[in-house]
Amino acid sequence: MPEMTSEVLEIAGKSLILQRPGIAASTLRAWDAADELLLDEALKRITAEQRVLVIDDTFGALTIGLGEFAPVSIADSASLALSLKANAARNKALQTPPEPHSWLNPPDGPFDLVVMRIPRHAEYLAWLLRWVNAQLSENGCVLAGGMIKHLPERSVDVFSAAVVTESVLPARKKARVVVCRQGKATLEGWPATWKGYEQEGLPARVEAMPAVFSRERLDIGTRELLPLVKPAVKTLNSGARVLDLACGNGVLGLTALACRDDIALTFSDVSSQAVASVEHNLKHCGYLERAQLLHSDGVPKESGKYQLIILNPPFHEGGVVGDHIALRLFKEAAEHLAADGRVLMVGNRHLGYHRTLKRYFRSVQQRAASPRFVVFEAAL
């Protein structure tokens, strides 16, 4: 389990102890000015009889801050469930929030007030607003907020195409909140829900939903790792277990399944839209019965051992860039690697993974490289 850092958020006369998993630096809080602005505005508008939905809360500030109104929470990231559980334990006087939904099990509307974080990517924002339109009550209100430096390009156009913008609140501490009403645009017939590309060796296009990294083209890191997947899979014994960790659209694991029909493949990602995308691709490729899907922030403890782990770790979490996610995934990969197993991973050259991998693996070998990326093979 990731380490937690905590600070106190003062909001509407309440003191909330909030925790952020996975980063040791105490200067990184579990909320930001956008959370504060959203909470302030929501508490001015909300009434006890209203049904409230929180979308993409990061570490629980919004869900717990509005806890007295029993909000329903949905997030793409599996890490919210861990944060809510930890924060509820630290704020015992407040109502414990229920398990958050994800895009694998979205809640049903209607909702009278929707409080949402504005994502960094325009197409995911466009998708969210169209989904919200179908869940909003007739006189419902949407409060959408984010840090100004993280708002996607063309966000004004995205809002105007999907919803009715009632007002844009004055910026505070470099955060912004947009107040919206229901628009006519919905996801039905919207062409941007699925985008993808053809990949050599696979029987169908690799497609993904808007929250998934590099959904329209094979990303350059995966391009360096992909040629090593087939040779590694061919050496496995029949029945071997393979994990595509931080799988994204699943192209690495799909390639492994295309090579062998006698291996067991597990796909795991923190993003529920990534997991839904892999399920979509498995169905189209005819591989669904041969795979397991996990919506998880890392490798669940009960997962057992794998003979091969494939990993292209993310190097950013929201606005924080670094190797903290990769280091945790390296540790979990080592804990779940069979004694005779190996990890194939790719990373940005400047992050120096050849050093950090040696904390967890006895053998670390460079297998491929480009000016920007390096591929390593690691073993216990």
Image (cartoon, helix red, strand yellow):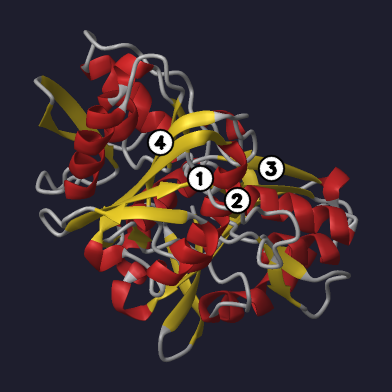
Q: Which residue is mark 1?
A: 76
Which residue is more in the foreground, 162 or 36?
A: 162
Q: Give the alpha-carbon distance from disc 4 to disc 1, as whole Å.
A: 9 Å
Q: Which residue is mark 3?
A: 293
Image: 106 above or below 197: above
- Asked if marks 4 and 2 touch (Cβ < 8 Å), the reply is no
- Asked if marks 3 and 1 touch (Cβ < 8 Å), the reply is no
Which residue is more in the foreground, 213 or 338?
A: 213
Q: Which residue is mark 4?
A: 80
Query: What is the x, y in percent for residue 150?
Result: 29, 64
Instruction: Compare marks 3 and 1 and give the one earlier in the sequence.
Output: 1
Q: Callout 3 environment at 10 Å: few (<14), some (14 to 19), or many (20+)?
A: some
Image: 339 above or below 68: below
- Going by the numbered disc 2, the residue's amino acid type is Gln
Residue 195 lies in quadrant: bottom right
Locate residue 231 relative to residue 351 in the image: left or right.
right
- Going by the numbered disc 1, the residue's amino acid type is Asp
Residue lying at 39% horizontally and 76% vertically, measured from the top left? 348
> Mark number for residue 273?
2
Residue lying at 14% horizontally and 59% vertically, measured from the top left? 174
Closer to the eye: label 2 or 3: 2
- Asked if marks 1 and 2 touch (Cβ < 8 Å), the reply is yes
Residue lying at 20% horizontally and 43% vertically, measured from the top left? 37
